[in-house]
Amino acid sequence: MNLMEDLQRVEEHTYRSVFDDGLVDLFAVVVLLGFGIAMVTGSFVPMIPIYALPFLWPLIRKRWITPRMGYVRFSAGRRQKERRAMHKAVVAGLLVFLAGAALAITIGVQLIPIRRQAVVHSIGLMFTLAMLTIMVTMRIRRFAVYATAMLLAAVAGVALGLSAEVYVNGIGAAVTVAGVAMLWRFARKHPAIPPEEHHATG
Amino acid sequence: MPPASEQHILLQLDRTVHEPARLAILTLLAGVETADFMFIMHRVGLTGGNLGAHITKLQERGFVEVRKEFVEKLPRTLVSLTESGRAALLEYRKTFQQVLETIPAGPKAP
């Protein structure tokens, strides 16, 4: 292995460690359970917190994560790669969402039951893609597990008639447990440092 | 200067880089643009005092650059690898690979 590959490996490893706090998982939970509960209740209200996520992310990282974990800035190349991947993910997510919505609105109701189910379960595919995107852009491997579970659940939903709200909420609950456990571990490993001690470490 | 024997290659290693804690710091910094004191402390697993001493040594050799800034009235010490530090790490790696080649893979049969 050459030096460049080794340095990239070090960078990857450090980059991955930045997301060991479980915050991404808990944000995914807000989206999953927002959709899941909205599907059960038929109300739009559970989805409202999703809109707060883009504002909460930098705020929580700045106020709670960085003071505990410390600050790191990655290379310009990585930051650019990250931005590009994020833009692609947003476009892909919107396309899947629009395609699903268009199918549901236009021909969904006229389809034979199994195809109608496929349209309903396209939400599973949307979440699978979103989780895979997180895995690829943020290099968080556990999101591959979440994505696989979501994909299998969506396939099972179509094949066995499993309700989409059941598995979306079920996987949401499982991710909650993982996220809370990681956040708990992070908080124990990185206790808050009082402002006066910042001078000692700085 | 006569060619170094296999064992003497070990003596060519830069001791500033060779010390495990400093090697860990340099390796970490090689993968990022900059990191603050606390991040390095957590990642490398050193106490504040120890880390400070190692950073000072690396700074004296010109391997790292230390910059202080204030973020909302709190001090933040940013450390980044210099070109000279990167070159030293590269040189260390090359030399250490030579050293590894001199170490037998397993004990010889009697």
Image (spheres, helix red, strand yellow):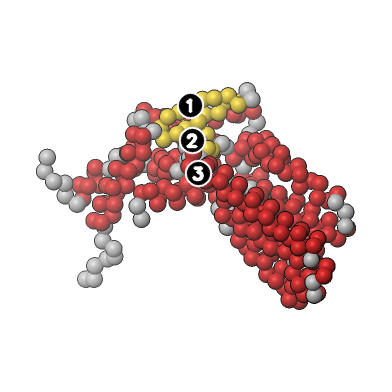
Badge 1 and badge 3 both on one subunit: no
Farthest left residue in view = B2
Q: Nearer the viewer, residue A168 or A125?
A: A125
Chain letter belonging to callout 3 = A
Q: Mark 3: give few (<14), some (14-19) or many (20+) Cα within 10 Å.
A: some
Q: Are marks 1 and 3 in contact (CB under 8 Å)?
A: no
Residue B34 in the image: x percent, y percent? Answer: 48, 35
Q: Which residue is mark 3?
A: A78
Residue A202 at x, y percent in the picture: 54, 28
Q: Which mark is residue B34?
A: 2
Residue drawn at x 40%, y 51% is A6
At 36% across and 30% down in the image, what residue appears? B62
Circles 1 and 2 in contact, beta carbons < 8 Å: yes
Name the amino acid, label 1: Arg
Q: Chain of mark 2?
A: B
Q: Secondary structure at mark 3?
A: helix
Q: Secondary structure at mark 2?
A: strand
| Residue type at numbered disc 2 | Thr
**Crowd band around label 2 with a 10 angstrom C-alpha radius: few (<14), some (14–19), many (20+):** many
Count of number-bearing discs: 3
- Residue B68: x and y in percent read 51, 25
